[in-house]
Amino acid sequence: DLPLLFDCDTGIDDSLALLYLLAHPEVDLRAVVSTAGNVPVDVVTANNLAWLGLCGRDDIPVHTGSEQPLAAPLRTTEDTHGPLGVGYADLPATTSTASRDTAADAWIALSERYSGELVGLVTGPTTNLALAIRQDPALPSRLRRLVIMGGVFYHPGNTSPTTEWNVAVDPEAAHEVLTAFGTGGAPAPVLCPLDLTETIVMTPDHLARLAAAADSTPVETPSPVDDPGTRSVADNPVVAALTDAIRFYFEFHAAHDEGYIAHMHDPFAAAVALDPSIVRTRPACVDVELDGTLTRGTTVADERGMWGRPPNAEIATRTDPDAFFDDLVTTVARLAAA
Ligand code: BDR
Ligand code: CA
């Protein structure tokens, strides 16, 4: 099994990524670490604990990260993910609490314990990992693989015209993490940028398939925008909570004229973390603009070696979204049915 550390800002799509990791038979999820992003870090931690509780996996430690990005003021996006980050889901209360060890501690300790084996997956700002690398610059060389959902290269941004959310929230962290790779034998992280993750389009049909595969009462086709917030009728608690979360995400995308769909950025990055062969990649030296009045937080890829620096990233460029959704639906249904 792959020992994996999941660093996230849960978040609706982070939630589904977590369920996918919990459900996957080849994953040994060693820690869930929370980063401030979609919602404040304490809310992220509460969400991570609640999902783990709902799935009966309180044994997996949750670590809380920094309340703030390295240098930028924190921004959150409740409009996108709901007031508590999980859309309309009403997650059951849990008595479990976060570990005393910080998120950065978890990165360092697990990369030591599983040196050469640990897979790192980041689906939020990279604040925790940047702090861990500041404390322990050898950390990158102990990872088997690192996959980050972040950045955008040849596609409109979702935070400013040229920026993607996870990088825009903490540009200094993304810069520090990326520049820690490319030399010293550490494997180049795979970046799953918005260019690709916006092609990972979930529809209500995927949720209906999931409910059917989980042997739950079929979920009603989620309401159109003119009837927002309808609760799920699924009898399976995991399917019901997930459906209530994703319905909010469908409505958010619909309100932005993208249709009654949702982009599954983070579950896709999770699938890449488990099997990088599902994407084509191209190597590049990637860095982050930290100044620019219009472009702060922009990821810039030097694909022709103009900077004279070695590649420090593999940018994911192509995949088969249908194959991804088949895997996602089958895998998560297994968890929900358990
Ligand atoms: C990223 O931003 C967040 O809102 C999502 O959870 C995803 O990780 C997409 O830009
Ligand atoms: Ca996220």
Image: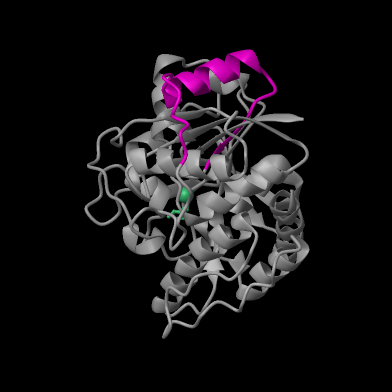
Residue 35 drawn at (x, y percent): 40, 37
Q: Nearer the viewer, residue 293 or 241?
A: 241
Which residue is at a point 62% across and 53% down the rendered structure image? 268
The answer to whether one can see residue 155 in this image is yes
Indicate the position of residue 142 as horizontal and vertical percent values: 61, 19
Q: Quadrant of ligand 1?
A: bottom left
Q: Compared to 250, does 64 lie above or below?
A: above
Number of labels in the image equals: 0
Taking the image as shown, residue 237 lies to the left or right of residue 87, namely right
Can residue 287 be found in the magenta stretch?
no
- Residue 125's x, y, as percent? 41, 42
Question: Looking at the image, is 314 positioned above or below residue 261?
Answer: above
Instruction: Look at the image and give the residue range highlighted in magenta.
Output: 94-122
Which residue is at 72% across, 69% downward? 209
Closest to the observer: 262 or 45? 45
Reply yes or no: does residue 119 show up in magenta: yes
Q: Is residue 223 left or right of residue 169?
A: right
Foreground: 299 or 92?
92
